[in-house]
Image (cartoon, grey):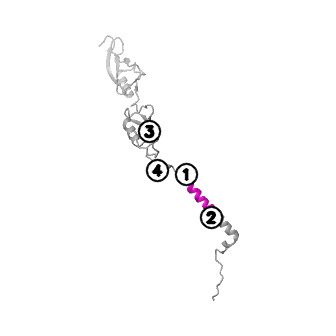
Amino acid sequence: MRARRHTSSPLGFLNQPHWRRALRDFGLILATFVVGYGASAWWLTPGSVLAADPTVPRVLELAEDQARERLTELGFRVRFGSERTHPSVPRGSVVWQDPPPGMVLPSNTVVQLVVSGGPAPARIPDVIGLALPYAEKVLDAAGVRVGRVDTVSGEPEAGVVLAISPPPGNGRPRGSAVDLVVSGGAGESR
């Protein structure tokens, strides 16, 4: 029979009862943490990541009918809000959507759309009393053009705007014409 030499293990201190309890308690705490973390990750993860829910497409700048068709094909419900003016998006095209594109949402979710009412109307500036060349520049900068120019006599200074139609302050579609009445000076009438 061979004699075994008794050597102490470097981890021999773990065989002592108080260390065993500490290891057991640490193991229970670690297991509780892992199970709790896994359960909370499963609970808090959106269901759409696990399910085959559709992604909200980008329908901005599409016509109203095209946007509605594209969203309903994916199972979304569509609700339209009031029109908004937009300087570059044509009338009847989508300028805003909520939820935004790229979100993964369950089918039957409502997607709200706002449609462009076209560019904002140009406000007619008050050019009465201005010289005609200057009045033309002011009207052009406001987004309207000069239409018919009538000349009347009776005013001492020629080339001054006496009246404008439609009246100043009114809104008109951009690019529309406004008519002017201009002074022809004393004694001239056309």
| Identity, as a three-letter code, of the amino acid under mark 2 | Gly
Q: How many marks?
A: 4
In the image, which residues are magenta? 26-40
Residue at 54 percent of width and 50 percent of height: 44
Considering only order in the chain, which callout, 1 or 3, is on the residue closer to the N terminus? 1
Residue 125 point in image, percent of width and height:
41, 23
Residue at 70 percent of width and 70 percent of height: 17
In magenta segment, residue 34: yes
Question: Distance between the Cα atoms at labels 3 and 1?
Answer: 27 Å
| Identity, as a three-letter code, of the amino acid under mark 4 | Ala
In magenta segment, residue 132: no
Q: Which mark is residue 27?
A: 2
Residues marked 3 and 4 touching at CB (< 8 Å)? no
The residue singled out by tag 4 in the image is 51
Image quadrant where one finds the N terminus: bottom right
| Identity, as a three-letter code, of the amino acid under mark 1 | Trp
Considering only order in the chain, which callout, 2 or 3, is on the residue closer to the N terminus? 2
